[in-house]
Amino acid sequence: MNGGPTGFNNAPVTRAFIIASALFTVFFGIQGRSSKLGLSYLDVFGKLRLWKLIVSAFAFSSIPELMFGLYLLYYFRVFERQIGSNKYSVFILFSIIVALLFEFLTLTLLKDSAVNLVATGPYGLIFASFVPFFFDIPVSTWFRVFGLRFSNKSFIYLAGLQLLLSSWKRSILPGLCGILAGSLYRLNVFHIRKTKLPEFVISFFSWISWPTTGSPPSAPARSIVGNIPSYASRQVERNYPSSMPSAIDPSEDSIATLVSMGFDRNSARQALVQARNDVNVASNILLEAQSH
């Protein structure tokens, strides 16, 4: 469950977000100002400083939280590869904004309780990502440890639980708000899943990010028409017969990348054959079929 073998390949938005989160955390940590970044009830009805609101969406309050948070953000880059960088950027903005609104509402309702400050960091995005992780990423292996049954997804859940409880009440609240935001995105409120940002925004993320590790697709993209269910290999074979002309044997790295996104291995291989080993085109084929 590493989210794919090729680092940040095809995930420039995730890469830029992780870099920003790490830099903000280290910068404010060195200055000793991390504890002042958390949002409080006074921020809702008092003077809300814009810089604090923006920074609180990136910077964690401690290095342990940063390590678990970056690990989860890095794994969840699989969703950027699934839906594309543009729609993933919309998912990030929606998750952060909606989670913040839920946090403000909760702080307003609980102003006289012990929960008067929420932890800083991209909790909204991370825990919103657990919603598609739960529903869309299948379990591929099971194993037992001391008689207890675990899946290959268990490590991600354990890392999320550790982050959720890292600051107790301060971190539980933004985590739960993130799950609510992810649920609303999955329910497609306001048709948010069809929304796209201008392409220059995605190009900006690619420009400011560090170079990608991993090999680019080995062949240019071309228009493909097909209707392939994501997890039904027999239907893949029906739509993509083995006697396809000019077929290209897909690379193991490309197959592994699609499998890491949650697609069936045989479905991934057949889609890559049609897409001439182009991972982006193959994932679009599989996702288009999944939406039907």
Image (cartoon, rainbow, N blue to C red):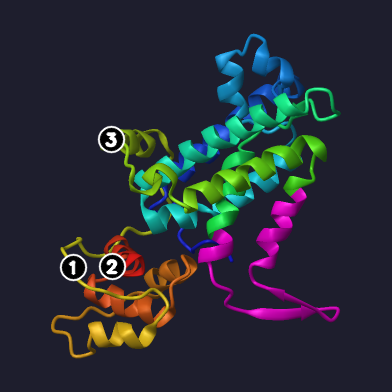
The amino acid at mark 3 is: Pro
The amino acid at mark 2 is: Ile
Q: Which residue range is magenta in the image?
A: 133-162
Question: Which of disc 3 and disc 2 is earlier in sequence?
Answer: 3
Q: Is residue 272 above or below residue 233?
A: above
Question: Which of disc 1 and disc 2 is earlier in sequence?
Answer: 1
**Which of these two is toward me, 170 or 112?**
112
> Does dot 2 land on a helix, a strand or a loop?
helix
Residue 291 magenta: no
Residue 285, label in figure:
2
Question: Which of disc 1 and disc 3 is earlier in sequence?
Answer: 3
Q: In this view, does 204 lie above or below 231?
A: above
Q: How crowded is mark 1: few (under 14 residues within 10 Å), some or many (20 or more)?
A: few
Residue 224, label in figure:
1
- Residue at numbered disc 3: 198
Q: Where is residue 277 in the image (x, y as percent from the top left)?
A: 28, 70
> Does dot 3 land on a helix, a strand or a loop?
loop
Cα gap from disc 2 to disc 1, whole angstroms: 7 Å
Q: Is residue 250 above or below residue 233?
A: above
Residue 155 magenta: yes
